[in-house]
Amino acid sequence: ALERHRPRLVYLQPSFHNPTTAVMGEARRRELLAVAERYRVVVVEDDWAGGLRFAGSDPPTLHALDGGRRVLYIGSFSKQLLPGLRLGWIAAPSAVTERLVALKQIRDCGSSPLVQASLNTFLRAGGLDEHLRRVVPAYRGRRDTMLAALAREFPSGTRWTRPEGGLFVWVTLPDQIDGEALFVAAQQRGVSYSKGDVFHSTGGGRNRLRLTFSVVGSGDIEVGMARLGAWLREHPSAGVDAQRSSEAIPIL
């Protein structure tokens, strides 16, 4: 792809990719950096779910493996800490950060200095570490509830990921199931998720869905999964003639 398109920049989520939940192994990360070096391309590494790991261990970041030479390392406090806190961070050479600060000021006059200063105090006091120690077990429990419900409620032939971190599960339904029909039925039953086709730029993904376990508790997860599973059992061969919906409304 680099040889064919010659991009200036490559954007990646090597850990807990959205929506597939995949984690790139260390060998693959080193291979990717070698290719980026060969084609002299900048890599943006989005570690959006940093700290939200439930099992296993983190491979070294691209930024660590590269020493920051070609990798711009970014993250967000919105997913780790508070959705309404629309602040992120970047580890990059000063020339890059200075230019980004200027562009940020042009775009929206910059983020609130008071909010940034408050967050800085919170981080220095160890608040984020304490927060993650509380929420990671809670997310792990909700993930386990969702995985158990998938096994219990969804039809034979359904496949899903077992994420070691992040905030969602990527589900592949049997081929004969039309995700558009399920999405409309789910909305009518008070259940929201992200349709798989919105993650595919060239079509496809109609029988896939991204289920998020970060927002609601285990009890609501079980209710929602039971409603989806009941519809799937009642419509085992739902076709493509179902009512169309204009957009997905994700839980998060």
Image (tube, helix red, strand yellow):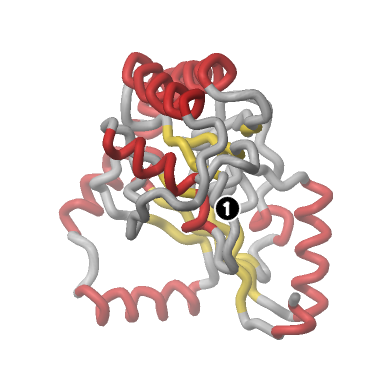
Q: Can I make out residue 124 in this image?
A: no
Residue 60 pos. (x, y %)? 70, 45
Residue 26 on image: x %, y %: 78, 46
Q: How many marks?
A: 1
Kindly identify which residue carries mark 1. Answer: 205
Q: Quadrant of residue 58?
A: top right
Q: Nearer the viewer, residue 157 or 165?
A: 157
Is residue 208 visible to us here? yes
Corner quadrant of residue 104? bottom left
Could you tell me residue 98's position as x and y percent?
A: 41, 77
Q: For this rendering, which residue is in front, 238 or 136?
A: 238
Instruction: Give the image quarter of residue 192.
Output: top left
Q: Which secondary structure, mark 1?
A: loop
> In the image, 228: left or right of 19?
left
Residue visible at 75% across and 72% down in the picture: 36
Q: Is residue 185 left or right of residue 7?
A: left
The N terminus: image quadrant: bottom right
Query: In the rendered image, which quarter contains the C terminus?
Result: top left
Q: Residue at x 60, y 32 (%)?
A: 163
Q: Is residue 30 left or right of residue 168?
A: right
Judge from the rendering whether residue 150 lies leftward or rightward of residue 135; answer left or right.
right
Give the vertical position of 182 relative to 74 (above or below): above
- What amino acid is at disc 1? Gly
- Residue at 32% x, 26% y: name it: 216
Position of residue 250 measured from the top left corner of the image (x, y, whole percent): 36, 45
Residue displayed at 43% across by 28% down: 231
Q: Residues within 10 Å of mark 1 (few under 14, many from 20)?
A: some
Is residue 129 depicted above or below 230 in this figure? Answer: below
